Image (cartoon, helix red, strand yellow):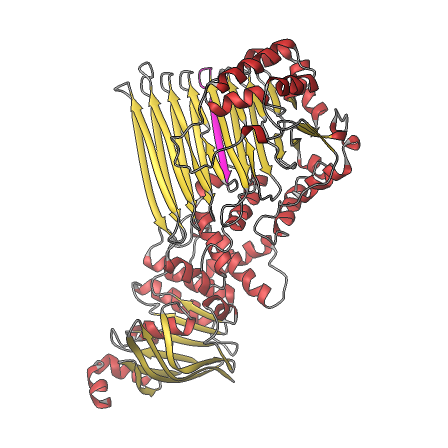
Amino acid sequence: MAATQETIAAVEEATGQYKYGFVTDIEVEKAPKGLNEDIIRFISAKKDEPEWLLEWRLKAYQKWLTMDSPDWAKLNIPEIDYQDIHYYAAPKTAEGPKSLDEVDPELLATYEKLGIPLNEQKMLAGVAVDAVFDSVSVATTFREELAKAGVIFCPISEAVHSHPELVKKYLGSVVPVADNYFSALNSAVFTDGSFVFIPKGVRCPMELSTYFRINEKNTGQFERTLIIAEDQSYVSYLEGCTAPQRDENQLHAAVVELVALEDAEIKYSTVQNWYPGDAEGKGGIYNFVTKRGACRGDRAKISWTQVETGSAVTWKYPSCILQGKDSVGEFYSVAVTNGAQQADTGTKMIHLGEGSRSTIISKGISAGKSNNTYRGLVQVMPKAENARNFTQCDSLLVGDKCGAHTVPYIVSRNPSGKVEHEATTSRISEDQLFYCHQRGLDEEEAVSLIVNGFCREVMKELPMEFAVEAQKLIAISLEGSVG
Amino acid sequence: MTLLEIKDLHAKIGDTEILHGINLTINRGEVHAIMGPNGSGKSTLSYVLSGREGYEVTGGDILLDGESVLEMEADERARAGMFLAFQYPVELPGVGGMTFLRAAVNARLREAGKDEVDQLAFVKLVRAKAKELGVSDDMLKRAVNVGFSGGEKKRYEILQMALLEPSLAVLDETDSGLDVDALRIVSEGVNALRGDARGMLVITHYQRLLSHIVPDFVHILAHGKIIKSGDKSLALEVEENGYAGLIDAAE
C-alpha cells in the first residue's frame, strides 16, 4: 500500500497538462543519427550479440527497406524521416548495473518524479520492476526472489546471453519480422526490453512491471518484450510509459510477443502516457506498436488491458491468436484523446481452435479536436468449431469538435461461430454534469467521475495500483476539455 | 437569522420569462412549502436557486447568508450550503455510490479548509445513515441511481442531504412517484434533518407530503409569482378547493 500511496501522491502533485514533461540531465552515449547496416552492427556490437541475432536484424532491415508505412488507419501522420533519428542512446553509467546502488542517482530521481519508485517501498509492495531508459534497461528489481520460483525476469539483451535457446526459439515466433512495417523496423534496431519466462506450473509470486522512458532528443525507442508462460503457469505483467515534453515528434515502435502454453494465463496491462504534444498538435510521441499473444496450448488465456492517454499518434492493436482448444482471448481498452491527438486502436482476435472464446470491451473518449478510432478484427477460421466472441465498443464525446469512429471487421468461416457486436456513442449529458455540480463537484471533478464511470468495466481489470494511477491520468488528460 | 432572501426575482429560459418577481425570505429553522399547479414555475425556481445553466436571472437577487449567489456557479453554491433534492435524479453509469458520496462530502470539506474524510469512518457513517433511510447496502454498491426504483432514488437523495448537511435544502417534488410507505420513510428522513441549523424549501404539487413534513409557511406559486402566503392551513385549503379559486382571486 505504501507504494500505492506514493503513486497517488505523485500523480496528485501534477499541476500542468503533462507532468512527465521534464528532461533528465545525464550523460548519454548515442549512436549517430540515421539507419543503415552499420548502425545495426553498432547496436548489435554494443550488446555483444551472437552472430545469429545480427543476421536476424540485418535480414529484418532488408525486409523493411522493401516495405511501405501502413496507410489504412484513420490517422494523419506527417512523413517520418527515418534518417533523422538516433537508434541508440544509453545513459553512460548504465552499462550493466548490478544493483540499484550502481544506478545513476539522476536516473533514480527521474523515476522518483514519475512516481515509479525503484526503492524499498516498491519492494515492499511486492512488484518487481524493470526500468528501460531510452535504449537500455537500467534496473531490474527483485530478480533473486523471482529466480527462486524459477521465474526469469531480465532485460532481453541479457536473456540473449543467459538463455539463448529460449530467445532463439520464441523471438519473432508470434510477430514475424515482416509482419508489418514497424515490426520489421523494430526487429532491425530493437535495443532493449523485458524478457519473462514462467516455467511449467509456476504462478509468478508477484506482479512484474516495466517502465519505459524516452529521454533523449530525436531518439526513437524500439523495445522488444517477450513473455513465455509454460503449461499451467500464470503471470501478470504491467507496463507504463512516459516521455519528456518536446517540440519535435519522437518515434516509439515496440514489439511485444506473448506465448501461453497449455492452461497458462498471461495478463498484460498497459498504462500508456507518452507525451501527447501540445493542443495544436506540435510535438508528441508517434506510437506504433505491435502487440500480439499466441494461446498455443489448450485452455490457454491471454488478457490485454490498456489505458491509452498519451501519444500524438497511436497505432496499436494488441491481438490474440487463439490456437489452443478452448483458449481464451480478452481485450479491455480505454483510449482517451484530447487536443489534437489521434488514436487508431483496437484488437484482432483470430479464432483457430475449437471452442475458443474472446471478449472485447473498448471505451473510447474523445475531447478537444481529437480523433479516436476503434478498429477491430474478429476472425473465425474454418476449424474453430463453436468459437464465440462478444464485442462491445462504447464511445463518449466531450465537446463538439472531436470525432469517434468504430470500424469492426468480422469474418466468420465456420457456421457454428457466434460473434456479437454492440456499439454505442454518447455524450456527457448536461443533466449529469448539473447533478454533480449540485453536489459541489467542479467541472474537472465531475467530468473525471463521469468518464471514469464510463470506463469502469475496463478499469476494474487493472491491478489495483495501476487503477488508481490510471483514473488520475484520465482526469489529467481531460483537463480543460469542457466548459 | 435570515438564511435565504429572494428579492423580486425575474428569470427566463431562452426568451421566455418564467419567474415574474418572486419575494421570499427563509430563516434558519424554518420549513417553507411552495405549492402550485403544473407550469407555475416551481421547478424553474429550484433550478434558478441552485444555479443551473440555461436559466438566466433578468432581475432581482438571491442572497444566501446575506451574500448574493448570482455570480456563483452551481458547484460553488452547493459548497456554500445549498442542496437540491432532484425531482428526477440522474443516473451516473459506472460511478460507484461510495465514490460519489465521498467526492461530494470531500468537496465541501475542502471548501471549509478541513481535512478530507477518513475512508473507513466514512463508510461506517454512510452505512448507518443509509440504514435509517432504508437504503440497502446493495444500493450503496451500485452505480449512482442506476437501476434504482423511483422510491429508491428519492431515498438516495435524502441520504445525500443527510451526509452533506446543507444550510438550505430545496426539495423538488420529492413526493412524486412515492407510494405511502416510501413517502413515510422519506418524510421521516427529512424531519430528522429539521432544526435550527438549516432552512428548507419544500416544493410540491400536492398537500399529502405536507401532512408528513409539516411546514411553518405555505406559499402558492402561480404564473411565476407568489400569489398567496399563509401557514399550513393554506395547504389544506388547496387540497379542499384546488388552485383555481386562489388564482382567480389573485387576478
Q: Nearer the viewer, residue A351 or A399?
A: A399
Above/below status of A83 relative to A159: below
Taking the spot 35% from the left edge, 86% from the top edge, the residue there is B231
Q: Residue furthest right?
A: A101
For residue B105, say whether it is visible.
yes
Magenta segment boundaries in residue numbering: A296-308
Q: Main secondary structure of the magenta part?
A: strand
- In the image, taking residue B217 as reference, residue B112 lies left or right, namely right
Give residue A382's quadrant in the image. top left
**Does the magenta segment cover residue A453?**
no
Q: Nearer the viewer, residue A235 or B143?
A: A235
- In the image, taking residue A46 as reference, residue B218 lies left or right, namely left
**Does the magenta segment cover residue A303?**
yes
Give residue A384's quadrant in the image. top left
Q: Could you say where residue A302 lies in the image, as x and y percent from the top left? A: 48, 25
Q: Could you say where residue A318 lies in the image, as x and y percent from the top left? A: 46, 28
For residue A166, say whether it is visible.
no
Which quadrant: the C terminus of chain A?
bottom left
Q: Could you say where residue A166 lies in the image, as x and y percent from the top left? A: 60, 12
Taking the spot 43% from the left edge, 82% from the top edge, the residue there is B61
- In the image, taking residue A216 as reference, residue A390 lies left or right, namely left
Taking the spot 58% from the left edge, 31% from the top edge, the residue there is A84
Q: Nearer the viewer, residue A362 or B155?
A: A362
Q: Could you say where residue A277 lies in the image, as x and y percent from the top left? A: 53, 45
Give residue A234's quadrant in the image. top right
Q: Nearer the viewer, residue A261 or B249?
A: A261
Which quadrant: the N terminus of chain A?
top right
